[in-house]
Image (cartoon, rainbow, N blue to C red):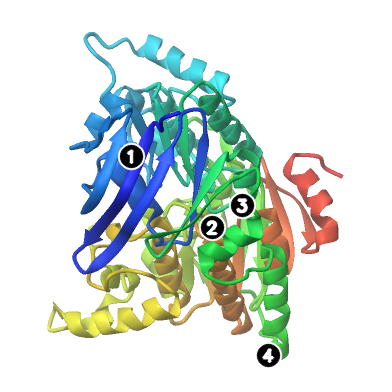
Amino acid sequence: MSPLLSLQGLGKRFGNLQALEGITLDIHAGTVHCLLGENGAGKSTLCNLIFGVYAPSAGQMRFGGKAWLPPSPAEALEQGIAMVHQHFSLVPRMTVVENLMLGQARGVLNRAAFAARISDIADRFGFVLDPNAIVGELSVGERQRAEIVKCLMRDPQLLVLDEPTAVLPPSEIGALLDICRRVADSGRAVILVTHKLAEIAKVADKVAVLRTGRLAAQADMATADMGQLVQAMVGREVKPLDVALSDSKAGDERDEGPLEAKPGFALVCDGLTVQDRHGATRLDNFTLEVRPGEIVGLAGVEGNGQSELGMVLAGLLVPTEGRYFIGDTELTHAGAAAVTAAGGGIVPEDRHAVACVTAMSVAENMYLNKLDRFTRFGLLQRRALNEAAEAQMKEFDVRAAGPEVAFSGLSGGNQQKAVLGRELTLDPLVALVAAQPTRGLDVSAVEAVYRQIRAAARRGVGVLLISSELDELIAVADRIAVLYRGRLVGERPAEMGERGAIGALMSGQLA
């Protein structure tokens, strides 16, 4: 059976950076083909070559038996290839239906009919999506669902999904994988990029591993050895994530000794309440204290108030009621700049919307909150800035051609590591609020990120860690609080034996 898509010796160079080299791969109709690789391995670049975002520097592609060199994504869409990107392409001020009508509606616009079509697709594939919701008011997971529905509306022959599950809560990942399976079973092909090995084991027919821009391994999933695939990805043997995190946590404690207790609290939330423009309560009387040197995990299925809490603590949303403090400083109405000045490090769940300026350089983004260190007589000293950024890139393993390249040129995982590095090097750093800090990161990068967060806690920083990855929270946090429908419904020790109880709280089963 001839492949639907065939890649022969495909390569892509950006200046001096060889992003891809010699990629030879066949994608068959009726299969789910997973791409595995570390951050910066070239997975997104490969997807963008297929979708017409970039033109290859070497090699050939064939699609449907014909030479394939799409001049643009629009042409790729017309010819039957649709792609869900890592980064959202929706207009925040428009509704879901208005966004999904862009580029698709012809003639007289029938909003009601289009909304009904969206609801039908969402229902059929297990989504919950309000066509009339304002995109800017949706959670990250809800926006991802809108992107996926937008893609499915094209009825493509080949569906390319670049890290689609990275922003979905655990309860919805299975539904998305089922969609991939149904699409493939209908005679189409699916390329799925993911870092989550359990997803590959569940849905993949074939898997390809990229490392440093080259094809490191290929396998049929029915006979594949998962350990060998991970070793091909990172170039070394890797322990299971929960074991690696626990071992690393114990090692930190042995190496650094007991933490000297500090008085007071690093972060205090007192009765925080948020109501949306429709009067619905999204965060309800949230009260929590985080001590210096403590890591408090906040668990919950996405869409239960985590996004609103993160925006409040970042100084980007004024709560309807309540107050919050970093150290002894009240910041309820102070704004984002005051949060930084008070020692609040913020890693938001949506790095593109509020954590970076993609048109600026990597160096400028990594020192976005402290560019005044590199200014003299009102002029930016770029050489000193780039040198400092290059050292910080090495410390946090941010992989790019150099500190002066545009931030938009980094992979999603490397963007996340750059944002984390910027916030962790804030001076002073009193409290760190990290929302989904490992989203889009590979297994080795996840371990490195949590090592950095634990090191900050050992220095006396109070950490509020918001994540839908329960196993990670258990391995890293000291205690875990649970959000359900905007309310703090319980708190448990961060122990594997408490996993069932925490999961029950996340689903609303109160003691």
In the rendering, at what x and y percent does residue 225 appear? Answer: 65, 55
**Closer to the camera in the image, 377 or 403:** 403
**Closer to the camera in the image, 486 or 233:** 233
| The C terminus lies in quadrant | top right
Foreground disc of the pair 3, 4? 3
Per the image, the residue denoted by label 3 is 197
In the rendering, at what x and y percent does residue 211 appear? Answer: 44, 63
The kind of residue on which mark 2 rests is Ala
Per the image, the residue denoted by label 2 is 435
Specify the label residue 255 is tagged with: 4
Sequence-earlier tag: 1 or 3: 1
Q: CA distance from mark 2 to mark 4?
A: 28 Å
Q: Mark 4, residues whose alpha carbon is within 10 Å: few (<14), some, or many (≥20)?
A: few
In the rendering, at what x and y percent does residue 375 appear? Answer: 19, 81
Sequence-earlier tag: 3 or 2: 3
Look at the numbered disc 2 and give the secondary structure of its residue. strand
Q: CA distance from mark 3 to mark 4?
A: 31 Å
Q: Mark 2, residues whose alpha carbon is within 10 Å: few (<14), some, or many (≥20)?
A: many
Q: Quadrant of residue 470?
A: bottom right
Q: Residue at x 63, y 83 (%)?
A: 458
Look at the numbered disc 3 and give the secondary structure of its residue. helix
Q: CA distance from mark 4 to mark 1?
A: 45 Å
Left/right of residue 457 with respect to residue 250 in the rendered view = left
The kind of residue on which mark 4 rests is Asp
Rendered view: 34 above or below 325: above
Rendered view: 179 above or below 508: above
Foreground disc of the pair 2, 4? 4
